[in-house]
Every structure is written in structure tokens, then in C-alpha cells.
Image: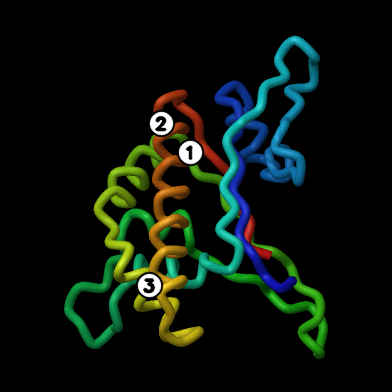
Amino acid sequence: MGITYFACAYPSDLVDEVFNDPRVALTINPTIDYWTAEHRKELPTLDLDKMWHSFQAVTAPPPKTMWFHYPRPAYRMFEGGVAGIDSAGMEWFPWVRVISPDETAVISRDLATLDPVLLATAETRRYGPSEYMAESCAQFLKNAQTFTNELIEDGLGFVYAIG
């Protein structure tokens, strides 16, 4: 259990509706109903589970001690975190963001340059070293790259939730 990352594409004809209410696109079932049976289509999804921490760490802005404070373009895909709503930290509000089709293309280009070794290093800091970690990081990166590539081919944006 715990806090995880899930992204779901949305149909291009729902851009305005999704920006007004991102929950329109988020679903546990990756088949999204366009509200009429003739438009039903399975759309791409991405589940990064808890790996989102490492993606966030390697795409975030560098420490403020450096002169260059801008995040990588892919950071838009991983930025955020939950907000706690009770004193025990057992319930939270998820972070939800809508990414436009134009942003998806920029993110995809940046993900193509991301080094899986950086991800593995970030994961190692959290969980300790292991061979499985390097393979796992490479696979999660490939999944994220495939997801964004599929979206740009179809001109789609996506919504992600961390929660």
C-alpha cells in the first residue's frame, strides 16, 4: 500500500472538460467511457507505483546553492505530493495534474534523455543497493517513455495522480 503514482491518457476531444475537472480522466479501469458506446476506446495508462519518488528526484531543480534552478521538462510529469488531512497522517489528498498534449511532447523528448542509472542511484538512496533495483528502474523508465511516445503519436495529453 502507500502512496503511488498513476497516469491516464484522456481523449483529445475532452481537453476542456479534463482541465476543468481532472477526475473525468482518472479511473482505476483503464477503459474510459467517452459517454457514448461508439466512442469507447482503451487509452494508455502508466503505473509507476512508488518509483515516482526517484523520477521526481532526478528531474527536480538542483539545490538552490547552484546558479541554475530550473527543473528538467519531465519534472512536470512527476512534480507534487500528497497533502495530509489528519494528524496521524493516515489520510491524504492526492496530487492531481493535467498535462496538455503540447506538454506531453516536451516531456517525452526529455524522458528520452533520462539515464536509468540516475534513477537507480536515487532508488538506492531510499532502499539500498541491489541488482534488481537497476533492472527495475530501467523498466519503469522504459514504461514512462513508451507511455509518452504513444500519447504524442495520437496527440493526447494525460492526467496523473500521486496518492
158 shown above or below 81: above
Residue in the picture at 71% in, 15% down: 39
Disc number for residue 100 = 1
Mark 3 crowdedness (10 Å alpha carbons): few <14, some 14-19, many ≥20: many
Q: Amino acid at mark 1?
A: Ser
In this figure, which residue is indicated by the disc labeled 2? Answer: 152
Residue farthest toward the top in the current orientation of the protein: 38
Q: Quadrant of the N terminus?
A: bottom right
Mark before the other along the chain sequence, 3 or 2 = 3
For the residue labelled by badge 2, is the local secondary structure a helix, a strand or a loop? Answer: helix
In the rendered structure, are the residues bearing label 3 and label 1 in contact, judged by CB atoms less than 8 Å apart?
no
Classify residue 129 as left or right of residue 26: left
Cα gap from disc 3 to disc 2, whole angstroms: 27 Å
Residue drawn at (70%, 37%), measured in percent from left and top?
A: 30
Per the rendering, the mark at residue 120 is 3
Q: Secondary structure at mark 3?
A: helix
User: Which amino acid is tagged 3?
Assistant: Ala
